[in-house]
Image: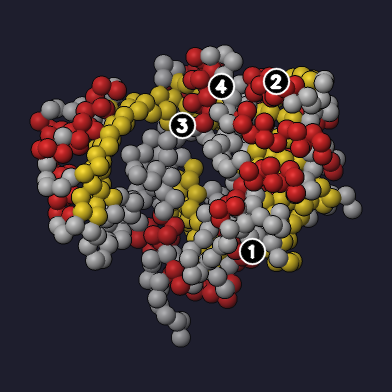
Amino acid sequence: MKTIRIGAGAGYSGDRIEPALELAQKGKIDYLVFECLAERTIAIAQKAKLADPSKGYDALLAERMEAVLRVCAEKGIKIITNMGAANPQAGAEKTREIAAAQGLSLKIASVSGDDVLETLKSGDIKITETGQPAASMSNVLVSGNAYLGAAPIVEALEQGADVVITGRVADPALFLAPQIKEFGWAFDDWEHLAKGTAVGHLLECGGQVTGGYFAEPGRKDVQGLGRLGFPIAEVSEDGSFVITKVESAGGHVTTDTCKEQILYEVHDPKSYLTPDVTADFSQITFTQEGPDRVRVAGVTGRERPATLKVSVGYVDGYIGEGQISYAGPGALARAKLALEIVQERLDIIGLQSSELRFDLIGVNAIHRDVLAPQPEPTEVRARVTGRCESMKEAVRIGNEVETLYTNGPAGGGGATKSARQVVAMLSALVPRAAVTPRIQIIEVQS
Amino acid sequence: MKLFDIAHSRTGDKGDISNISVIAYDEKDYARLATHVTAERVKEHFKGIVHGDVVRYELPSIGALNFVMYEALGGGVTRSLALDPHGKCLGSALLALEIPDSDA
């Protein structure tokens, strides 16, 4: 039975780069997939593209390609990534430049067509969370990108692409596409598409299935997190598969790491919705076949959703923040006093803010009052943050924390302040007919 | 004992929705999780953090529960004022839940 090996070269846009090179060199992989596009990343990339039409792809695209292109070309490993972000063509062009500089001959495809911003601005599409028409917020909309499925990636591979660079594509589709290409699964073969989607879901966060985001000293110990290996799926044409890693790499693949990852960002496990299929993980099983080898079974599937999800980016005001630390006996009382003083100051200066938050880091910043610390901490950091309509207003919050140095409780140190524009995300559903994927192939011959 | 003694967890985020998996180290303990870690108890545990509904999904095939908590992330990951806007730390907080030492 035909089997392929797919490696996950990144779990998010800022992820470590060496594990991808390790996979290419030692993983005996056929495909290297980089999933680098969080919800908000594309909205920020869209702003970069507006400022400079040659930009708008992932900030680390060049560094990643420089690291892996040569070894992938030598070994015939194909690369699939959503690092094209808001500008897949520009990402492909940058990759072409790097390939040419390295003296490589490659076919590089870009997949675009996910951008539906104009449709949102002019049409009657409603925002899922608010029920309001997207067009009513057109003055603050930054981006609208539909989640494409595997089909255009499969087509690019069929056309002989060595590297496929996409914008917004459903994360598991990046991994499903090479399976469809290699095994010839039909686009309505829900059972196989669901199994292939489970491969993608387990791999898309990189090290999160090989021991990252997992260690609990004394209970769930993981060796070698400093040189954590990224995962490999060994997939057969009947859709059965094993999750594993490079033997010498750090981390481990166990039934427990797989259990945690299969439910990561999943709501109803019976209905994991993607553009390609509705996958059912509710009867999944994991079996440890050997060291760092877990076999996955029990995934089923049914028809894909009728609509495509769109992530909608919009400018949502400004957030200002300030922090300052207190230590030693009485630290908690002084930090509480600090927050009271800032609250009073914000009243006195008439800060215009729609939401304010006061935290004691080390006490209640994460868990509020769910878990009260005992005994009293000897270091506490006071934090004040708030939402404002202008940058000018947001800046005042951090300033009022900083002035605690000379106007606040004893021994306040290490004050920091910041203010930033907020690009926030909402979602919408669009008919499939509203989206037309486009594939463009450029070639570099050396 | 605490839930921490028999289960591990992982937290994920989508918009203003947080999901926490609770997974028995030993699949034989799944029934205890199912009995004692109810949606109502989870909602009570996160009072002041989770403002919407808590829905529980059951996965006996892997000895796990999945809790989906609405209005849980300060208005959404991308706009929250929280120090941990993704709520990644929430799963660990849930493991502080007290459960009976045995069902005997």
Residue under pointer 3: A425
Residue shown at the point (31%, 59%) measured from the top left? A370
Give the CA separation, mark 2 to mark 1. 42 Å
Residue A306 falls left or right of residue A3: left
Q: Nearer the viewer, mark 4 or mark 1?
A: 4
Give SS at disc 3.
Answer: strand
Q: Is B34 rendered above or below residue A66?
A: below
Foreground pick, B66 / A419: A419
Label ID, residue A56: 4
Residue A151 image-quadrant placement? top right
Residue shown at the point (57%, 73%) measured from the top left? B26
**Which comes before the other along the chain, label 4 or label 3?**
4
Q: Amino acid at mark 4?
A: Gly
Give the CA separation, mark 4 to mark 3. 18 Å
**Which comes before the other along the chain, label 2 or label 4?**
4
Q: Nearer the viewer, mark 2 or mark 4?
A: 2
Asked if disc 2 and disc 1 are in contact, CB closer than 8 Å, the reply is: no
Residue A328 falls left or right of residue A136: left
Q: Amino acid at mark 3?
A: Met
Q: Amino acid at mark 2?
A: Glu
Q: Where does residue A180 sit, x and y in percent of width and height?
A: 80, 40
Chain ID at mark 2: A
Q: Where does residue B78 sit, x and y in percent of width and height?
A: 42, 35
Q: For the C terminus of chain A, which image quadrant?
A: top right
Q: Nearer the viewer, mark 2 or mark 1?
A: 2
Foreground pick, A183 / A36: A36
Label ID, residue A255: 1
Chain ID at mark 3: A
Chain ID at mark 4: A
**Which comes before the other along the chain, label 3 or label 2?**
2
